[in-house]
Image (spheres, grey):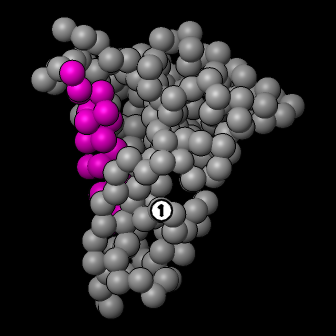
Amino acid sequence: MVIKKIAILFSGEGSNLEKLLAAVHNKVFEHCRIEVVTTICNRPNAAGIEKSRSYGIEPLIIDHTLYGSRESFDEALVEAILKSGAELTVLAGFMRFLTPYFTEHVKAINLHPSLLPLFKGGSAIKESFDSPMKVAGISVHYVSEELDGGEIISQRCFEKSEDMSFKDFETKIHALEHELLPETVKNLLNRN
C-alpha cells in the first residue's frame, strides 16, 4: 500500500483542519493510505492546536512574529515541511501571504472562500455576499506567488437567495469548505 504524506498549515479555529483530519488521516483509499505527517500553526494560541492534538498529532508552532521578515519565516516553514517528508501541503485556514521562496520549494494547495478568480484576499466572503452575483462558492487552488492566483483545482457553488443573511451565507461557505477540501486532497493523492 502506497502511503501519501501531507502537511496541514492552519492559523485559527482549525475547523477545516479537523474536517481534513477526520476525512483523510490514516484512511485507506483505493490506491493509497493518506497520512498527515505534520500540522503547522503560526499562532501559538490558536484553537486548532487542540484539534490537531485530539488526532494524536502534536502541531509544530512556528510563530511568525518571531521572524524578522516574511522570507525568514517561510524558510523555517519550508524546512519543517521538507523535514516531515510531506509530498503535498494543504493550507487550511492558514492566514499568511507566502513568498516565492515557499512557492519554489513546496507543492501546496489552498482553500479559498470564493469562486476564484473573483474576490481574492481576506475579505472574500463579505465581498462575495455583497456582490450582485446570483451564485457564490469556494475554490481549491495550487499556491503560487500571486495571492489566490494559482491554478484552480476544484470549485463548488450554490445559489444565493434574496433573504439569506450574512451569517447564513458564511455558514453555507464553511459547510462547502468542509466537504470540498478533503475530497480534493483525496482525489489528488488517490491516483495510480
Q: Is the magenta stretch mostly helix, strand or loop?
A: helix
In the image, 146: left or right of 21?
right
User: Percent from the top left, x then y, of residue 108?
Assistant: 50, 33
Quadrant of the image containing the N terminus: top left
Q: What residue type is labelled 1?
A: Leu
SS of the residue under disc 1 = loop
Residue 93 seen in render = no
Give the residue at x 42% y 16%.
37
Q: Is residue 149 above or below residue 162?
A: above
Q: In which quarter of the image is residue 76?
A: top right
User: Residue at the spot x=78%, y=31% of the render?
Assistant: 71
- 153 and 177: which one is in front? 153
Q: Where is residue 92 in the image (x, y as percent from the top left)?
A: 46, 41
Q: Is residue 173 magenta?
A: yes
Q: Which of 56 and 79 is in front in this view?
A: 79
Residue 80 visible in the snapshot: yes
Give the quadrant of the C terminus.
top left
Q: Mark 1 highlights which residue?
A: 116
Residue at the image position 56 percent from the left and 14 percent from the top: 82
Task: Sort mark 1 into few (<14), some (14-19) or many (20+) by Cα contacts within 10 Å.
Answer: many
Viewer-side residue, 159 vs 164: 159
Is residue 5 one of those drawn in magenta? no
In this view, the residue in front, 107 or 168, is 107
Q: Which residue is drawn at 49% across and 42% down?
A: 142
Instruction: Pick out the residue farthest to the bottom.
Output: 162
Task: Tell me if 146 is positioned left or right of 18 in this view.
Answer: right
Compared to residue 47, the image places residue 83 above or below, namely above
Residue 104, quarter of the rendered image: top right
Which span of residues is magenta-colored? 171-192
Rendered location of residue 96, percent (x, y): 65, 43
